[in-house]
Amino acid sequence: MSKHAAIESDELAADRTDRAAHAVEQLTRWRDDFPAPGIRFADLTPVFADAEGFRSVIDCLAATAPDADLVAGIDARGFLIGAGVAASLGTGVLAVRKAGKLPPPVLRREYQLEYGTAALEIPADGVDLRGRRILLLDDVLATGGTLAAAADLFAQAGAEVVAAAVVLELTFLNGRDHQGAYPLTSIVRV
């Protein structure tokens, strides 16, 4: 739905969410002990490779912040959904990159993963983020460090995260507890 679309009924919104959730539940590939022992990895590749599943996920995520003026997708699967949502909303898209993938100058934020540490970066120049209304997207919310670090980067740049959304939330890892005041939507919660 574009940011210029009419307000939809609750019934249509629920149907859209149900279609996306069904695709995620049916097509997600689970792998135990990847990328490290004790981790259960949710691979959404089959969801994104399915035309109907991908479209339903994009439609569902786009509806979470139709007033955003920039979509940000977190490295790497967030790039896929970010581009699709940005095209649907008629906005630009910004890639939130893993450390070392962007030329300097960059804004950088380190964070904890459930299996180690990492860092994210966004450009420090070339894209004026001051005052921008960001829809922040990622594929999976686990411990919450990645999404929170990305939100911190945008705050540091003077932007406002108006909403965050993920395809799949692993509720037992309590990642939602580490998020800011922005609304957080997940299509499927397990």
Image: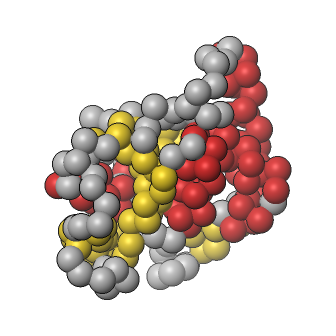
Report whether 142 appears left or right of 160. right
Q: How is the image coloured?
A: secondary structure
- Residue pictured at 64% horizontal, 68% vertical: 43
Quick check: 63 left or right of 14? Answer: left
- Front residue of 179/55: it is 55
Does any portion of residue 113 appear in the rendered image?
yes
Q: Which residue corresponds to the image point at 22% horizontal and 67% vertical from the top-left?
A: 124
Residue 15 left/right relative to 138: right
Residue 148 image position (x, y, % from top left): 30, 54
Q: Quadrant of the N terminus?
A: top right
User: Is 89 situated left or right of 175 in this image?
Assistant: right
Vertical comparison of 49 with 136: above or below: below
The answer to which image quadrant residue 101 occupies is bottom left
x and y, in percent, of residue 54 in the image: 73, 54
Taking depth in this image into account, of 183 and 105 the one nearest to the observer is 105
The structure residue drawn at horizontal position 61% and vertical position 17%, both measured from the top left corner, is 7
Residue 150: x percent and y percent? 31, 58
